[in-house]
């Protein structure tokens, strides 16, 4: 940033002066306005005081807050999520400077709305010569099928984002326009939440504008274009493997939207419905987070597997609000930027308040010659964001970075297909302080600023942004690259900012005591989350019984003991170990930590985490944090270590159970999660009784059975003698008040199923309830001295049949003919 004679002198001492001493000459806290310098100095000194002068302490504190919020992301090709790289130093912009940006982006959103509407209707901009036809048709995001399919209320855009950068002299430029997916807005919100938690009242004391009113306006704007007054709006996600799925889940939860994937949705008679456990429920609007090509395999790209067949039909009939309207991405091509200045004059009769970075489309002779003659001074990229000949990177390549052969190849390719290329000016960015390797360092930054349409159709700019601090040379990347950091961007007012919440000015909504809809896929995930957690716990109990013995039984460390052989054999049967031969210590280490075994604790917890990712919008952050805690690794671990580790893991599972028991509202979501645990516990109980409670069971077998079923203390308080077969069987299988007993699980399953919604209008029970009630009736008359292994086998088969019936009724796709009378 250019030096300013009015800048205050640099005093000695403190973070502010240390940064200024290291920053480029005249680079004053990334802000061209000298009036902001005191705000920067105050902020840095307060951060320094909070961290006791140690930047690493501050960075670690902010990082922990980001982890607690569940912030994460993926780079292309990543299988596992990465921790969110949030820097602890916010970027400050004054209210006056921000007002200029707001005006420029509102003007730009209005321009893009009108241009998109023209492209898909009269196309007068093309016929009048203001826009070459090949700029439109050459874009992979232009969809001819959308011609003549106007959106409800006529709004092509509800949400718009612009990547902007500031030059060294303080001028702002638009680097790119983004309307296809609003990536970054959730991260901007999470950055603010994490920084606010980590810095206490710092942001409030600095008069930082709040973000909540913007999200309130966004939600109201989406609802205003829906057909019903109290609409049901879904956030359409590509799924949990998407790079920004964590952001999408957080936004859905924050805004009260229904997080849905393509397979959750179905179109019937031109209307969109979500599959729920209550049947099909109408969806009035979608905030889509996937490209248009993936929306409908019948209308756009037939290869997609994540879209909704006939979604285009629902759009074309005018009964569905989609933000942004399919095909809007046509204006994102780099070639389009070359024509926006003249389009502003033609459409708005105005000059752009925020200009683009200078762009030359090589499909025009004069512009092509300009790029060719100044190749070393420009960057060259694909005009339509596709791989093209002569460019090693489809994004942008500096001409000066090409060797002779590469330069000749590029020029030859440009001569053959010039319309595929654009040239742009080299962007020089101002910097902002960031903590890198334990010290304040100036890094170049860009801002992604977000604009939303409110309930009155007016554009509202979020008073903040997603700031990306470039750790590499490609500042034109879509969001985050390897080595990049993010930062909170704060708009600083001259007056205190009144508190605000997502309630907005409309006050509190009407009181409801319902848990909301539960999509069939979410119910499926919750059910199996419970089953995997329960299987993990029982596997851990088996390991603990093997390495630690029991309270009374001395089963010994050798497989020569029949009881020990049965314990190890069960681990092998569940796939936790490759076989039952070998020393018990190494076998248990495998069962606990070998990711190659399908039934090991490590693998099971991985499955819990994978299912949990798909439930991010429904799980509390405490649950997510417990699920993602690292597991211990074992290489020839000693027995005592295995015992301690298995006990600690059981404690973690118990903590998960406690959170579900005490924190989850007793909604249908909780019922399916608890049903999963009850089902798995009951099935495991049957198998354990068969294994350790058969007619020839020894005292050691019965003691281990009581241990595994966590019923030792209950047995001792009732019986003064050692374990005997009939009372042990009764306690672990038939006792209606023992939360580990099979009969207890059956009763709870029947209660849950009876409380779930029914699709029948005749009052008759559905198949799952019939099976659950029959199971309870099968167990009720039995006592421990009557129970046989044939009874246990029959109960296990009934449980497996009940599990299948639950899946058929609640998890599979609901046939239209069964639910037409339930559509609402």
Image (cartoon, helix red, strand yellow):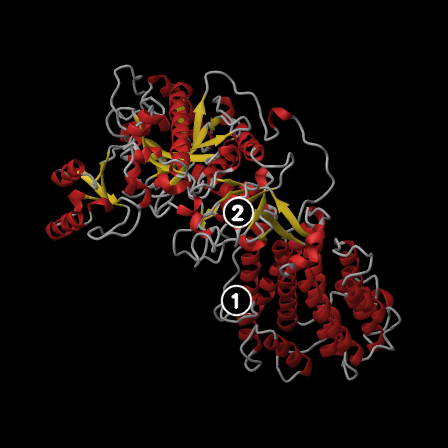
Q: Residue at x 46, y 19 (%)?
A: 493
Q: Residue furthest right?
A: 781
Q: Residue at x 61, y 56 (%)?
A: 521
Q: Position of residue 559 (x, y in %)?
A: 62, 82
- 331 on left or right of 392: right
Of 675 and 564, nearer the camera is: 675
Quadrant including the N terminus: top left
- 20 on left or right of 781: left
Q: Position of residue 693 (x, y in %)?
A: 76, 77
- 774 on left or right of 644: right
Q: Position of residue 179 (x, y in %)?
A: 42, 39
Q: Residue at x 54, y 26 (%)?
A: 456
Numbered label attached to residue 236: 2
Precedes in sequence: disc 1 or disc 2: 2
- Total labels drawn: 2
Circle 1 SS class? helix
């Amino acid at each position: 940033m250019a030096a300013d004679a009015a800048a205050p002198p640099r005093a000695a001492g403190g973070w502010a002066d240390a940064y200024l001493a290291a920053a480029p000459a005249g680079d004053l806290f990334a802000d061209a306005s000298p009036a902001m310098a005191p705000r920067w100095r105050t902020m840095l000194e307060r951060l320094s005081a909070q961290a006791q002068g140690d930047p690493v302490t501050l960075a670690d504190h902010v990082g922990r807050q980001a982890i607690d919020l569940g912030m994460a992301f993926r780079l292309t090709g990543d299988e596992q999520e990465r921790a969110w790289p949030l820097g602890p130093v916010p970027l400050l912009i004054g209210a006056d400077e921000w007002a200029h940006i707001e005006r420029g982006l509102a003007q730009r959103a209005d321009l893009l709305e009108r241009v998109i509407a023209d492209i898909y209707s009269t196309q007068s901009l093309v016929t009048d010569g203001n826009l070459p036809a090949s700029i439109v048709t050459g874009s992979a995001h232009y969809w001819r099928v959308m011609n003549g399919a106007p959106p409800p209320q006529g709004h092509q855009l509800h949400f718009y984002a612009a990547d902007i950068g500031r030059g060294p002299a303080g001028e702002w430029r638009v680097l790119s326009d983004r309307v296809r997916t609003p990536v970054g807005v959730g991260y901007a919100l999470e950055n603010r939440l994490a920084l606010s938690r980590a810095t206490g009242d710092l942001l409030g004391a600095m008069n930082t504008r709040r973000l909540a009113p913007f999200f309130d306006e966004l939600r109201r704007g989406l609802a205003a274009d829906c057909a019903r007054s109290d609409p049901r709006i879904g956030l359409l996600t590509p799924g949990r493997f998407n790079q920004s799925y964590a952001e999408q889940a957080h936004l859905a939860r924050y805004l009260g939207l229904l997080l849905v994937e393509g397979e959750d949705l179905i179109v019937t008679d031109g209307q969109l419905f979500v599959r729920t456990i209550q049947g099909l429920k109408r969806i009035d609007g979608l905030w889509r987070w996937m490209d248009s090509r993936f929306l409908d395999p019948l209308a756009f790209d037939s290869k997609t597997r994540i879209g909704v067949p006939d979604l285009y039909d629902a759009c074309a009939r005018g009964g569905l609000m989609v933000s942004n309207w399919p095909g809007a991405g046509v204006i994102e091509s780099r070639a389009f930027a070359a024509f926006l200045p003249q389009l502003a004059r033609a459409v708005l009769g105005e000059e752009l308040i925020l200009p683009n970075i200078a762009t030359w489309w090589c499909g025009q002779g004069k512009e092509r010659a300009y790029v060719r003659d100044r190749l070393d001074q420009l960057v060259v990229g694909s005009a339509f964001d596709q791989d093209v000949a002569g460019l090693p990177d489809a994004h942008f390549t500096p001409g000066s970075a090409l060797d002779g052969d590469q330069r000749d190849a590029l020029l030859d390719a440009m001569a053959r297909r010039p319309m595929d290329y654009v040239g742009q000016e080299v962007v020089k960015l101002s910097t902002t302080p960031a903590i890198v390797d334990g010290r304040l360092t100036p890094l170049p930054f860009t801002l992604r600023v977000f604009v939303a349409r409110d309930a009155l159709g007016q554009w509202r700019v979020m008073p903040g942004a997603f700031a990306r601090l470039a750790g590499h040379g490609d500042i034109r990347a879509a969001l985050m690259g390897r080595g990049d950091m993010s930062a909170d961007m704060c708009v600083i007012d001259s007056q205190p900012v009144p508190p605000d919440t997502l309630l907005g000015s409309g006050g509190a909504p009407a009181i409801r005591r319902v848990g909301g809809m539960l999509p069939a896929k979410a119910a499926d995930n919750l059910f199996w989350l419970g089953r995997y957690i329960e299987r993990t716990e029982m596997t851990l109990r088996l390991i603990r019984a093997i390495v630690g013995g029991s309270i009374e039984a001395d089963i010994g460390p050798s497989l020569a003991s029949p009881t020990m052989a049965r314990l190890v054999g069960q681990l092998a049967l569940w796939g936790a170990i490759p076989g039952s031969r070998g020393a018990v210590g190494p076998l248990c280490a495998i069962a606990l930590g070998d990711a190659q075994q399908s039934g090991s604790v490590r693998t099971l917890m991985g499955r819990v985490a994978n299912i949990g990712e798909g439930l991010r919008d429904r799980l509390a952050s405490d649950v997510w944090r417990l699920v993602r805690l690292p597991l211990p690794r074992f290489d020839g671990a000693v027995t005592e270590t295995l015992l301690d580790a298995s006990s600690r893991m059981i404690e973690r599972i118990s903590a998960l159970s406690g959170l579900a028991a005490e924190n989850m509202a007793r909604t249908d979501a909780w019922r399916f999660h608890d049903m999963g645990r009850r089902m798995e516990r009951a099935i495991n109980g049957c198998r354990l009784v068969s294994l350790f409670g058969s007619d020839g069971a020894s005292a050691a077998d019965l003691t281990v059975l009581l241990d595994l079923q966590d019923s030792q203390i209950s047995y001792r308080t009732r019986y003064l003698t050692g374990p005997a077969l009939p009372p042990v069987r009764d306690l672990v299988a038939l006792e209606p008040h023992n939360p580990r007993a099979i009969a207890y699980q059956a009763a709870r399953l029947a209660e849950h199923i009876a409380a779930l919604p029914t699709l029948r209008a005749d009052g008759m029970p559905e198949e799952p309830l019939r099976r659950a009630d029959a199971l309870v009736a099968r167990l009720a008359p039995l006592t421990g001295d009557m129970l046989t292994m044939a009874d246990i086998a029959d109960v296990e088969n009934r449980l497996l049949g009940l599990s299948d019936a639950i899946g058929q009724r609640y998890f599979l796709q609901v046939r239209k003919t069964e639910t037409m009378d339930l559509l609402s």
